[in-house]
Image (cartoon, helix red, strand yellow):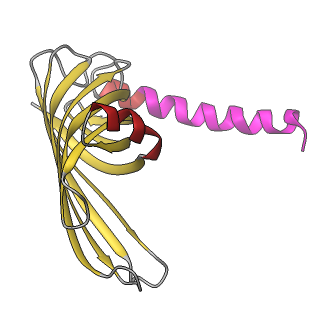
Amino acid sequence: MNIFKKVPLAILIGSTLLPAYAMAQSQMGGPGTVGPSAGDREFSLSGTGSSNKDFDNSSFGVSVDYGWYLSDRMLAGIRQSISYADVAGEDLSGDFWNGSTRGFVDYHFGRGAARPFVGATLGGIYGDGVKDTGTAGLEVGLKYYMLPSTFVQARAEYQFLFDSGDSASDNFDNGAWAYVLGMGINF
């Protein structure tokens, strides 16, 4: 299929979505009236989970964030995550609980309903399935304001563990990705 046959479809989709986006903005008072202001606080609750095809190796977790807006774009706060894994295997099996407490700083872009962000975290991880140690990470995400102060969010965080400054630089290449989906409010 050549590109000229795809153009009318793209125009049709765009002409359908653009009015819907404009209507959503007008219902929220237009750009600049959604989202936080400097001094506002934020609370969010997110979840994650996975299972293999037989559901004999499963995990799930929740993450609670509480933060303060230092400006209308910069959020600093604390994040508590708890995860549970039920693992069945030859080398390792059983139930494992892990927790993580991290400070975070995120910078948000844009002023409309969709707000992408980037950030960094620093804290500790502890529990049954891990050695109690420090953790740091970089994150990227998107918040979408459905109401002036209520949003849904998706976040991906690259985390790595360390015991000292030297091990932090050594372990950066051995990190892991964590993904969450959740909701939050500004107040």
Measured from the top left, where is residue 60 in percent x and y?
29, 66
**Residue 77 painted magenta:** no
Residue sitting nearer the eye, 24 or 52:
52
Overall secondary structure of the magenta section: helix
Residue sitting nearer the eye, 100 or 62:
100
Which region of the structure is painted magenta?
Answer: 1-22
Give left or right: position of 94 versus 187: right
Q: Is residue 117 above or below residue 55?
A: above
Give left or right: position of 22 versus 95: right
> Which quadrant is home to the N terminus?
top right
Residue drawn 30% across and 30% down?
Answer: 120
Residue sitting nearer the eye, 15 or 134:
134
Q: Is residue 173 above or below residue 89?
A: above
Give left or right: position of 67 versus 11: left
Image quarter of residue 84? bottom left
Measured from the top left, where is residue 162 in percent x and y?
29, 42
Residue drawn 41% across and 46% down?
Answer: 175
